[in-house]
Amino acid sequence: MQIETKNFGAIEVQEDQVLTFAQGLYAFEEKKRYVLLENEDPENPLWWLQSLDDPNLVFVLINPFLFKPDYEFDLSDEDVEELGIQKLEEVVVFSLVVIPDDIKKMTANLLAPLIINATTKKGKQIVLLNKNYSTKHLILEELQKIKKGEKQKSIKEGSSYVSSDQKKE
């Protein structure tokens, strides 16, 4: 099928690409059918979730593990059953992103991730009861923490390597 979108113009969508969120997304409960659009730039980690029910509705998404590697949560048995999850490899997780005028303040909603079964094409937005996550988690700040941690690890490993060499002499 071909759909006309506000941001992407006319796009061709195959039936097997259609994602169904039976309960919709929070504040958009009536919009249930979407297509996931990958960024053409492999360096850009953002994706788009285009509504098939409203051509003006599109969400920006990111894989939360890219900037928050220790992100974790449990799915309820009800969620697993509802999404038809048989194997962990079927599960895809995204966070909704808000991009303000100052891109440095770009945030992700870690409190209400989107869970998608890539096999059944069923999706659900769940709400986590974890006070360590927020609806406005600063993405660039988290990426800087990762970079800083990698740099410190590299320095530490380098100094360990140097001390090991010195002991050999």
Image: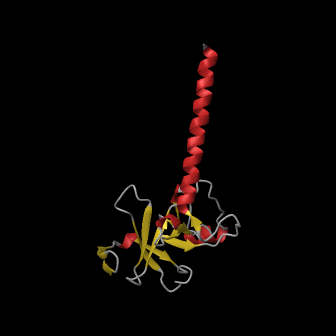
Extreme-front residue of the structure: 102
Please state which of residues 36 and 98 is positioned toward the viewer in this rendering: 98
Please state which of residues 54 and 138 is positioned toward the viewer in this rendering: 138
The residue under the point 39% across, 70% down is 17
Query: Would residue 83 appear left or right of 5 to someone viewing this image?
Result: right
Query: Would residue 101 appear left or right of 72 to someone viewing this image?
Result: left
Q: Position of residue 163 (x, y in %)?
A: 63, 24
Extreme-bottom residue of the structure: 30
* Residue 88 appears anywhere in the view: no
Q: Position of residue 44 (x, y in %)?
A: 41, 59
Q: Position of residue 45 (x, y in %)?
A: 44, 59
* Residue 16 appears anywhere in the view: yes
The number of numbered discs placed on residues in the rendered structure image is 0
Give the quadrant of the N terminus: bottom left
Colour scheme:
secondary structure
The residue under the point 46% across, 70% down is 60
Query: Would residue 72 appear left or right of 29 to someone viewing this image?
Result: right
Please state which of residues 80 and 105 is positioned toward the viewer in this rendering: 105
Give the quadrant of the C terminus: top right
Q: Quadrant of residue 47?
A: bottom left
The residue under the point 62% across, 58% down is 71
